């Protein structure tokens, strides 16, 4: 089992942003959260991570309500990578990754596994040779890799990513998603790009105004009708080796 949500609803700023959502990722799969801006993707990730609490419904980890878990035990299992990777402190990649070990330190600040976990995280993300580089010298793709390495240093079972390919060029988008899907974790990823979701996600859930519009495999879910109904655009969808490929049509101006 892994992180899951049952009938979540959450009001933020007077607006219902998550409305009765149930999501059950399978252990080890890459699960995509899709939908237009304002559909509730980031809000749902925050609820799954325990950052915010729903008005109703439950989030569980291995069947246990996460409200029964302390912050530190939860952080040892669930890691979060946000959209933006910024820091005002000019630290090295190694020190960024070291931050992921905070939940594992005892009351005296000790962590016997720290250096080993950091080394494994750097290796998994291909950053070993860049460990002593300063943050300000990194490209956007390298910064995103460093943030993923920090999350991996937590040694989580679940990795939640909020649009990790935002602001990256195509090569780095493919690189980051290929990395995430090869990690031995359950990945829940909010994405804008439907074609990337189709390429890398085992299953997807599409949100519309906080509600579930569709869920299933990309081939089952990403249909021409769904794209038009949820996103308001016309598209043709073909299946190429089991993977849907979405081609958008230009909007005709009157």
Image (tube, rainbow, N blue to C red):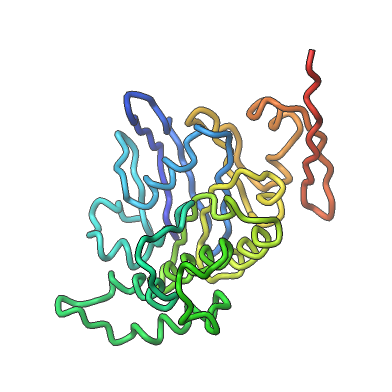
Percent position of residue 49, x then y: 37, 52
Closer-to-camera residue (44/247) = 247
71 with respect to 150 (left or right): left
Query: Residue extending furthest top?
Result: 254
125 with respect to 101 (left or right): right
**Count of numbered badges drawn on the protein:** 0
Percent position of residue 43, x then y: 42, 40
In the rendered view, would you say 126 is above or below 216?
below
Quadrant location of the N terminus? bottom left
In the rendered view, would you say 105 is above or below 169?
below
Residue at left offset 73%, top offset 45%: 219
Residue at left offset 29%, top offset 42%: 53
- Quarter residue 55 falls in: top left
Closer-to-camera residue (139/221) = 139
Percent position of residue 2, x then y: 44, 59
Closer-to-camera residue (86/41) = 86
In the rendered view, would you say 26 is above or below 33?
below
Percent position of residue 220, x then y: 71, 42
220 with respect to 114 (left or right): right
Residue at left offset 32%, top offset 28%: 13
Quadrant location of the C terminus? top right
Residue at left offset 58%, top offset 63%: 141
- Quarter residue 18 falls in: top left
207 with respect to 233 (left or right): left
């Amino acid at each position: 089992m892994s992180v899951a949500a049952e009938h979540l609803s959450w009001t933020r700023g007077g607006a219902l942003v998550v409305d009765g959502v149930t999501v059950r990722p399978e252990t080890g799969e890459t699960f995509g959260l899709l939908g237009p801006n304002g559909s509730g993707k980031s809000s749902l990730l925050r609820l799954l991570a325990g950052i915010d609490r729903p008005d109703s419904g439950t989030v569980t980890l291995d069947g246990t309500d996460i409200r029964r878990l302390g912050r530190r035990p939860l952080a040892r299992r669930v890691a979060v990578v946000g959209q933006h990777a910024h820091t005002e402190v000019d630290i090295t990649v190694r020190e960024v990754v070291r931050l992921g070990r905070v939940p594992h330190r005892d009351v005296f600040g000790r962590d016997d596994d720290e250096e080993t976990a950091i080394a494994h995280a750097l290796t998994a993300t291909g950053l070993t040779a860049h460990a002593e580089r300063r943050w300000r010298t990194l490209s956007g793709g390298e910064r995103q890799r460093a943030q993923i390495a920090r999350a991996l240093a937590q040694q989580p079972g679940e990795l939640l990513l909020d649009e990790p390919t935002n602001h990256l060029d195509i090569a780095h988008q493919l690189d980051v998603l290929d990395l995430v899907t090869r990690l031995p974790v359950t990945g829940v990823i909010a994405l804008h790009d439907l074609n990337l979701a189709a390429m890398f996600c085992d299953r997807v859930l599409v949100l519309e105004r906080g509600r579930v519009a569709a869920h299933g495999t990309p081939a089952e879910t990403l249909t021409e009708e769904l794209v038009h109904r949820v996103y308001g655009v016309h598209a043709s969808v073909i299946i190429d080796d089991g993977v849907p490929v979405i081609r958008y049509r230009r909007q005709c101006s009157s």
